[in-house]
Image (spheres, rainbow, N blue to C red):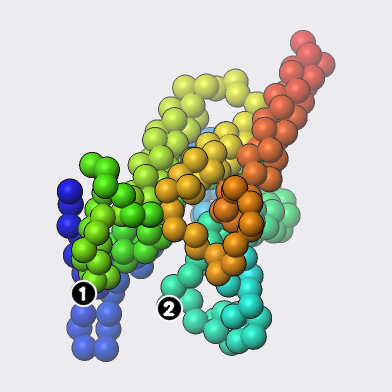
Amino acid sequence: MLVWAGDPIAVSLGPVVLRWYGILFAGGFILGYFIMVAMFKRAHYRTEDLDRLLLYIFAGTIIGARLGHCLIYEPDYFLAHPIEILKIWQGGLASHGGTVGVVLAFYLFIKFSRRYRFFDIADMLSVPIALVCTFIRIGNFMNSEILGKPTDSVFGIVFARLGEDFARYPAMLFEAASYFVIFIILAVLYLKWQRRPEGFLLALLLFLVYSARFLIEPFKEEQADYSTGLALNVGQLLSIPFILGSLALMIFVTWYDRKRRAKSA
């Protein structure tokens, strides 16, 4: 059984403090940027447009994830103290809200650039996004947050920095491992499946990520400050629309691709 007492602070130089979470978050985006550069070069697209795309995606992630956490998991507190929503450095980001924020930001990028097809670039983005999610969950582990329920299993980890002497499921590491596997699957499909329907990788990303979330949520402590009163917790309920929507998108893009190919045959 592992005892984890890692320091969330990587470097501290006077008033300047660098946390592992921030380093991993930014590092994931930077690595994702270079993956997108390689993809754009492969498709003979303008790599200079990626700087603007990165800013859109970064802003959409932060704003969407922060609002998602505040309005989904602790609405009573943050609606009573709206100024607290701005204090992102105190923690509190929700992936469901982040997903919505990224989609909206990406839509604005496509609309204003008028140079790319939505699903074409979305499929490219799906690959590094899965990797970014992996880095973020490792950052959560460094912070000893998004805790799992107590367990006596061999998978248990004691989060000693929190003053605990009992083991919990490392739910954030379960998610990190899942997202890394999803990254590998999407990367292979992107490279090997040349005649895939546009939008299929985006749909597959959403389906796999939120299916993983749905399955892992029961191992987590409830993150919301209220109960659903149901067998499913808040995280599971929020994942269901993404799972169903991604299945519908998968069916639609496959049907549309077959229809398009039939017309051109």
Snapshot quadrant of residue 7: bottom left
Residue that sits furthest to the right in the current view? 263
Q: Amino acid at mark 2?
A: Gln
- In this orientation, which residue lies closer to the viewer: 86 or 4? 4
Residue 188 is tagged as none
User: Taking 116 as reference, is 147 left or right?
Assistant: left
Tag 2: Cα neighbours inside 10 Å, few (<14), some, or many (≥20)? few
- Comes first in the chain, label 2 or label 1: 1
Q: Which residue is mark 2?
A: 90
Q: Position of residue 42 (x, y in %)?
A: 48, 35
**In the rendered image, the vertical position of residue 259 relative to residue 224, given as above or below:** above
User: Taking 8 as reference, is 213 left or right?
Assistant: right
User: Taking 105 as reference, is 264 left or right?
Assistant: right
Tag 1: Cα neighbours inside 10 Å, few (<14), some, or many (≥20)? few
Q: Nearer the viewer, mark 2 or mark 1?
A: 2
Identify which residue is drawn at 63% across, 78% down: 76
Asked whether residue 94 is in view, the answer is: yes
**In the rendered image, the vertical position of residue 216 relative to residue 235, given as above or below:** above
**In the rendered image, the vertical position of residue 219 relative to residue 182, given as above or below:** below
Mark 1 falls on what kind of element? strand
Q: Position of residue 125 (x, y in %)?
A: 53, 45
Residue 11 is tagged as 1
Q: Position of residue 63 (x, y in %)?
A: 58, 69
- In this orientation, which residue lies closer to the viewer: 54 or 203? 203
Mark 2 falls on what kind of element? helix
Identify which residue is drawn at 48% across, 76% down: 88
Count of numbered badges drawn on the protein: 2
Identify which residue is drawn at 46% across, 44% down: 216
Asked whether residue 130 is in view, the answer is: no
